[in-house]
Image (cartoon, rainbow, N blue to C red):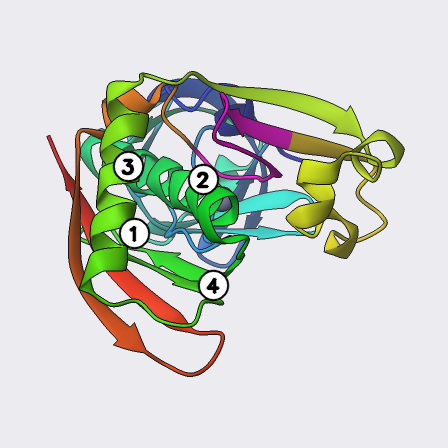
Amino acid sequence: MTELLYQKDSYIREFKAVITEVVDDFVVLDRTAFSPTGGGLMCDTGTLTTASRDVYKVVEVISRGGKVKHKLSPIPEAEIQGGKIKGKIDWEKRYKQMRLHTTIHSISGTLYKKYGTTVTGGNITPEKSRVEFDIDHLRQERVQEIEEAMREIINGNHMVTVSFLEREEALKDPDLIRTKVNLIPESVKILRIVEIETVDRQADGGVHVKSTKEIGTFVPLKTENRGKDKKRLYFTVRP
Ligand SMILES: [Zn+2]
């Protein structure tokens, strides 16, 4: 198992770890601040530096069966297994993803409160993001309502907190039921809960900013009708 440092503190940019496995061009670490691909987010990139000062680029990060696998360039020699490394993530790209991700959760909470609707999909890239939901239409006035709600949330400087909850407790929480906490595999006994004070609360494994003020400015880009339950909103955030 890899200890997921980014789940406890999304602001760790550099960390020390030990290489526990080398498989082809991937290494597994005992602990990592690199967030893997998943949950609509792209993985982090960055570097690993060995004790003998060899620097590897981390070009891809995936999570498999509790192990976080870091794809390196150049391809690592098997001898680096057991060695200590210093990891450094590309902070600019990561921080933008944190801001976009907290925005998606804020939109999710807003839509539920305003229209009783739920988010059905989403995707985040460092440039822009999209969120999909089950709603009758996404015409201009509704986009403006979402923009206005986001402005209030950002100006309101709501705290974003992470806690860990036992599965049985989570299944009793109305906010978590709404966000389909029951669909998380039963093997997961402790759930990570991300709460945006008074805005949104859901089980989530990804990286977030610690207050909505850090989002900056919410900028809607365009809308797309992809079917009855798939109204898409593309957006980005600016400083
Ligand atoms: Zn999320």
Residue at disc 1, secondary structure: loop
Tell me: is circle 1 under 8 Å from ligand 1. Answer: no
Q: Residue 74 carries which label?
A: 1
In the image, the segment drawn in magenta is 193-207
Q: Which of marks 2 and 3 is in front?
A: 3
Q: Where is residue 10 in the image (x, y as percent from the top left)?
A: 42, 24
Label pair 2/3, CB-CB below 8 angstroms? no
Alpha carbon separation for disc pair 3 and 4: 19 Å
| Three-letter code for the amino acid on which mark 3 is drawn | Met
| Three-letter code for the amino acid on which mark 4 is drawn | Gly
Q: Name the residue under label 3.
A: 150
Label pair 4/1, CB-CB below 8 angstroms? no
Please determine whether, in this image, residue 100 is positioned above or below residue 87: below
Q: Which of marks 2 and 4 is in front?
A: 4
Q: Earlier in the sequence, mark 1 or mark 3?
A: 1
Alpha carbon separation for disc pair 1 and 2: 20 Å
Alpha carbon separation for disc pair 2 and 3: 26 Å
